[in-house]
Image (tube, rainbow, N blue to C red):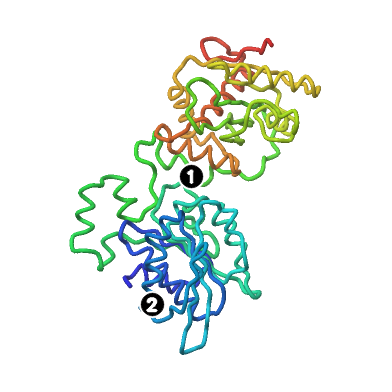
Amino acid sequence: MHRAQAEFNSSNALYRGFVGGRGAGKSWIGSFDIIERAMNVEGTYLVASPTGILMQDTTFPTFKGLAQDLQFWESVKLSPYPNVTLYNGETGIRSTVRFRTAEDPERMRGPNLSGIWLDEASLMEKDAYLICIACLRESGRQGWLSATFTGKGLMHWTYEIFGKNAPDTAIFHSHTRDNPFNPVGFAETLGKQYSGLRARQELGGEFVAVEGAEWPAEYFPESIWFDDWPDLNWRARVMGLDPAKGRSAKPGCYSTWVEMAVDDKLCLWVDADMDQQRPVEISPSNPHLPSIVGDGVRLIRSWKPSAVVVETNGFQEMVATALHRELMAQNILVALFTICNSQPKPSRIRTLGAYLAGKRLRIRRSNGGEILMGQLRDFPVAEHDDGPDAVKLAEVLADYLLTGNREGPGRPHILRP
């Protein structure tokens, strides 16, 4: 082992992350670590790869070769996934190691486990981690989890879990050049192909901000988050909707409802409800199914805003009309506005930088809030920007309610269904 591998292997933290550059020995130390632990504590263990291809090409061959070299390999059943039996002839300890893929995290539910290794964890969904750790209770013992991966940025779940010094958690970093078993000059050769932040991520094993992002990392301190809505004398309470159903919408866009409150210092407090698949209309056969309109009505009932605004570019006025119809049907009183934006979306979103720089934007720590934060942090190079656009919609409406300013393009207009 090299130094970072040895420190990872000797750690007693319940949740350990090994984040390394390319060729830093991530799969090797992940294999060695779980084999050693399985041969000291008899039980059932899980090894997970992001896909079946990665499991067959990398994870399983590395594990098998090392277990055979250490003379702990006893047998394997290969259908539908490998189930390996390891045996320590000196102690008589026999353990089972189950191999699974994380393509569908729900299918990772199973028997209680003594330990888990997630190989290439940053290529998995967060649910894979959350579902797995609930299985760490074999024979009444608290089990452990290790994850090996290359960093994927400051908004990825691997950074949220392993990179913030959380209780019972440890993180170990390794640069590609730290591994003395690579070919001579391997790190330097790769370094000629990578530069800037990508080199720090792919070679240095660092969590880095996305290259080309509009705003620096210091605009997103930990203090930007809040968990529960504070009891303040709000100057305005509004909601904004970017339906993501217009002609220019990209595949996979998020329909985004934003709840916004403005305090006495003109700080914006926001939460977001974001979905990539929900349809516009409520289903007649099952009104409880998610939809832009149905979820909006639910949020309006809960949040009780004084006004709501919907973006109507590119035939999206149909969403505002459907929402108005449903609010009337349920006897819900709320002022409904529309905005048809003519200014380019990046120009609109850039105005939020003043709130970030002045620490006047707070984001609720929720599933939607985390997606919103990621889109803000990676703007304008993020794949999607529906969350920040919905925040801007709500901010424009709040400004109108507080100042009466409705001059110029992109200002609120009362819906006239």
In 3D space, how far apart are the residues under numbered discs 1 and 2 (Cα atoms)? Answer: 47 Å
Image side of residue 343 versus residue 201, left or right: right
Q: What residue is rendered at 32% in x and 45% in y?
A: 197
Above or below residue 133? Residue 74 is below
Image side of residue 6 versus residue 46, left or right: left
Q: Which amino acid does label 1 sit on?
A: Pro
Whether residue 290 is visible here, answered yes or no, is yes
Q: Where is residue 327 in the image (x, y as percent from the top left)?
A: 75, 22
Disc with the residue nearer the chain's start (1 vs 2): 2
Q: Residue 70 carries which label?
A: none
Of all residues shown, which one is farthest toward the bottom? 90
- Is there a contact, CB below 8 Å, between mark 1 and mark 2? no
Question: For the N terminus, which image quadrant?
Answer: bottom left
> Which dot, 1 or 2, sits closer to the camera?
2
| Residue occupied by mark 1 | 221
Quadrant in the rendering for residue 189: bottom left
| Residue occupied by mark 2 | 68
Q: Which of 32 and 259 is in front in this view?
A: 32
Badge 2 crowding class, 10 Å Cα cut-off, few under 14, some 14 to 19, many 20 or more, is few
Q: Where is residue 100 in the image (x, y as percent from the top left)?
A: 51, 61
Q: Which structural element holds mark 2? A: helix
Q: What residue is rendered at 62% in x and 72% in y?
A: 138
Question: For the C terminus, which image quadrant?
Answer: top right
Of all residues shown, which one is farthest toward the right? 331
